Image (spheres, rainbow, N blue to C red):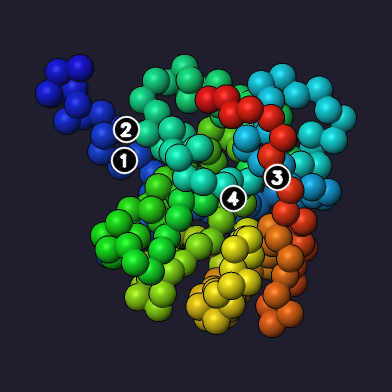
Amino acid sequence: MKSKEIRNNERFLRNAYEVTEGIGMPIIAKNKNPFPPIDKMLSYHDTRLHDHRTETQSLLVHFFKDDHRFEHLYYEKNEKRDFDRIKKLAQYSAVCTPDFSVYPEMSLPLQRMQVFKNRWCGAHWQDKGLLVVPTVTWADQRSFEFCFDGLPQHAILAVSTVGCKKYPVPFLRGYTKMLEVLQPEIIFCYGDRLPEMEGNGQSFAYKAFTKKETM
């Protein structure tokens, strides 16, 4: 690809979707249609290209796993591979946005980039017709300035408590701030809810993925 083509390539510029004022975070819109019942959360690792399970329309695909297993979804430049993955995700009831990790020890620019990747994937998938559930993640209080940007209020959101029981105070601090800022309608929680977690939620037990990773 020539320099001029790269300069005008949307996958390089990441400017195809509406963004917030100020920091310019891609916006994930609130779902307008009635949300289907969700019986289970399914790891992206366990999705299938041709999934003939009868319960696919009650499965919510999640990305609560190591970042390196799904980073290709953001960095993919091949349109056909991108289309094939979206076609695979479309078999299921809905899909969470990728849980790109945000840690307190990260520099703030890197934290913002992780959140940006989450929002961009959500906006991209919505544009392609998928039913998207925004995954919310945060680090320390510094991240509160941007980690809720681009997310809809009074909507259905997803969080995970996996690994948070060792650090309940910072998790609950961010969770409480999320409730204040976004006022979610329902919170899908992957992992056991902590006793202090308020809000209308539905929990799904942690389950290790079952099959070998495929791109």
Dot 2: few (<14), some (14–19), or many (≥20) neighbours within 10 Å?
A: some
Query: Which mark is nearer the camera, 4 or 2?
Result: 4
Q: Which secondary structure, mark 2?
A: helix
Label 3, secondary structure: give it: loop
Q: Look at the numbered disc 1 and give the secondary structure of its residue.
A: loop
Foreground pick, 140 / 135:
140
Type of amino acid at the residue the image marks with label 1: Arg
> What residue appears at the point 57 percent right and 25 percent down from the top-left corner?
214
Q: Is residue 154 visible?
A: no
**In the picture provided, is 212 more to the left or to the right than 22?**
right
Q: Quadrant of residue 210?
A: top right
Label number found at residue 49: none
Residues at marks 2 and 1, CA–CA distance in whole angstroms:
5 Å
- Image spot of residue 139 (x, y percent): 43, 69
Q: Which residue is mark 4?
A: 64
Q: Which numbered mark, 1 or 3, is in the foreground of this view?
A: 3
Q: Amino acid at mark 2?
A: Arg
In the rendered image, which residue does mark 3 sit on?
208
Give amino acid for label 4. Phe
Residues at discs 1 and 3 in contact (Cβ within 8 Å): no
Residue pushed farthest left?
3
Label 3 amino acid? Ala
Q: CA distance from mark 3 to mark 4?
A: 10 Å
Is residue 96 depicted above or below 170 in this figure?
above
Which numbered disc flags the more N-terminal residue, 3 or 2?
2
Q: Earlier in the sequence, mark 4 or mark 2?
A: 2
Disc 4 or disc 1, which is closer to the eye?
Answer: 4
Identify residue for label 2. Answer: 11
Q: Which residue is mark 1?
A: 14
